[in-house]
Amino acid sequence: MASFLVSKTTTVLLLVLVSLAQFSMGSRVLSSLVEQPSELLTYHNGAVLQGDIAISIMWYGAFTPTQKSIISDFLLSLTPSSQTRPQPLTPSVPQWWETIDKVYLAKAGKKTKTTNIVLAEQVSDEECSLGKSLKTSQVPELAARAGPKKGGIALVFTAQDVAVEGFCMSRCGLHGSDRNTGSAYIWVGNSAAQCPGRCAWPFHQPMYGPQTPPLVAPNGDVGVDGMVTNLATLVAGTVTNPFGDGFFQGAREAPLEAATACPGVYGKGAYPGYAGDLLVDATTGASYNANGVRGRKYLVPALFDPSTSTCSTLV
């Protein structure tokens, strides 16, 4: 009887964490648990992004130069050029990104089988011309202002004093697409002043659940380091499922994707309320699991490997 109670309690805790983690990484909330098939993610024979992927950025609201560089350096770290590539360090952001090329694009049978992230235009709207309370329907408008390229991605980042419909309540970011232009877009908000316990975990104590001490953010900015983690999740989902007919599991309107299929998992040994066994910087005490360009350190989510039906972590 005792072992049954422990098992039941563990199951309940797991359900709670999955729901909270799924909530924190995208626009979906799990309301029930169904038995998963042996292969969690399947390819639906649709388009994936490949080759040179131009990244255009809209900075909406006030971001400091340091905050912009933390995020830009992460994007440059995905597929660094010979000019920005540091001395080989593992684990690394490019090593994490290789899962997309080697597992997802290869499984889709794409001839290119490689991606190359290229930073394109960056525009700023520090005065918040649409106001500081946005509707979700305004996100594509802001994305269009970034000048997205065909086959590229427009990124919309909103500052910590900008409220977006559903932000903190049901999502920390989202991705969508415009088939007419052949481009995709991503929105991620800075949660530092609104809901760091939901959208910047594990760098802030969770709003609910066990109140364990938060981890030290690798770049010293809880809100922006949280944005990078959410951005990584959404970039992985966008490249592998840009138009809703690529890699996903579940309902097309609320799919589990490459990273959201592994909620709350960042290192081996992760369990409810624990991000996993991460690396710790000896100087700053910051937790991370990937090295980037210019000496940056980041926390990236586990990626689901459809070929093994497991969550793949760097550490």
Image: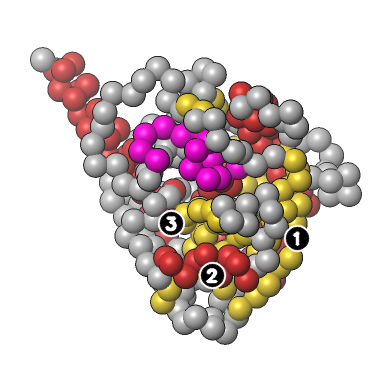
Q: Place residue 171 in its image quadrant.
A: bottom left
Q: In the rendering, which numbered label is found on residue 120?
A: 1
Marks 2/1 in contact by CB < 8 Å: the verdict is no
Magenta segment boundaries in residue numbering: 239-252
Specify the quadrant that holds the N terminus. top left
Residue 74 shows in this picture: no
Nearer to me, 206 or 107: 107
Q: Is residue 35 left or right of residue 86?
A: left
Q: Is residue 292 left or right of residue 219?
A: right
Would you call the spot at circle 1 few (<14 residues within 10 Å), some (14-19), or many (20 or more)?
A: some
Task: Name the residue that disc number 3 marks.
Answer: 172
- Against 65, is 216 above or below? above
Q: CA distance from mark 2 to mark 1?
A: 18 Å
User: Which label sits in the foreground, 1 or 3?
Assistant: 1
Q: Residue furthest right?
A: 83
Q: The residue under label 1 is which amino acid type?
A: Ala
Is 240 in the magenta? yes
Q: What is the magenta segment's predominant secondary structure? A: loop
Would you call the spot at circle 2 few (<14 residues within 10 Å), some (14-19), or many (20 or more)?
A: few
Residue 114 location (% of width, % of height): 74, 34
Would you call the spot at circle 3 few (<14 residues within 10 Å), some (14-19), or many (20 or more)?
A: many
What residue lies at 60% left-to-right and 80% top-to-bottom? 126
Task: Name the residue that disc number 2 marks.
Answer: 141
